[in-house]
Image (tube, rainbow, N blue to C red):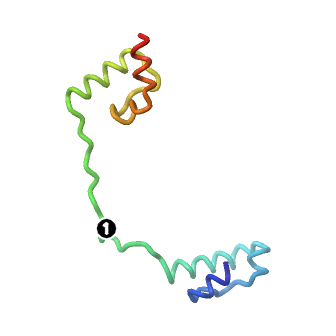
Amino acid sequence: MLNEAEKIDCREFVAPNDVAQGNYKLNLAFVANLFNKYPNLPEPGTDEFEIDAVDETREEKTYRNWMNSMGVDPHVNWLYSDLCSGVIIFQLYDI
């Protein structure tokens, strides 16, 4: 770990013995130094995107509510992903 940190010029504050003994303050200083030199976090506002609301058609909602009213387990929240295993469909056949 320390050899790799030295390659990116971040080996400060700690020696191998400090890591092995778990010296909290020195290890914290090492990690803080690593994040200060290489934060890898985007600047606020650069990669913001809006999550689109997933719309459900009237027919999908009606069908989902009908299945839930039949007492299937597990409860159907999203028609397509919850039916992909086929367990709920088999439960509806048995009713």
Q: How many marks?
A: 1
Q: Compared with residue 14, is residue 62 higher up or lower down, i.e. above or below? A: above
Q: Secondary structure at mark 1?
A: loop
Looking at the image, the residue that sits furthest to the top is: 95
Q: Within 10 Å of the Cα at label 1, are there few (<14), some (14-19), or many (20+) other Cα atoms?
A: few
Q: Compared with residue 80, is residue 13 higher up or lower down, i.e. above or below? A: below
In-image side of 51 versus 76 (left or right): left
Question: Is the N terminus in the top left, top right, bottom left or bottom right quadrant?
Answer: bottom right
Question: Is the C terminus in the top left, top right, bottom left or bottom right quadrant?
Answer: top left
Foreground residue, 46 or 63?
63
Q: Position of residue 34 (x, y in %)?
A: 56, 80
Q: Compared with residue 94, is residue 36 higher up or lower down, i.e. above or below? A: below
Residue at 20% in and 28% down: 58
Foreground residue, 89 or 42?
89
User: Where does label 1 land, which residue?
Assistant: 47
Q: Position of residue 69 (x, y in %)?
A: 36, 16
In-image side of 17 versus 51 (left or right): right
Q: Position of residue 38 (x, y in %)?
A: 49, 80
Q: Position of residue 71 (x, y in %)?
A: 42, 16
Residue at 74% in and 84% down: 15
- Disc 1 marks a residue whose amino acid type is Asp
* Picture quadrant of residue 86: top left
In-image side of 54 versus 68 (left or right): left
Residue at 25% in and 50% down: 52
Residue at 26% in and 27% down: 61
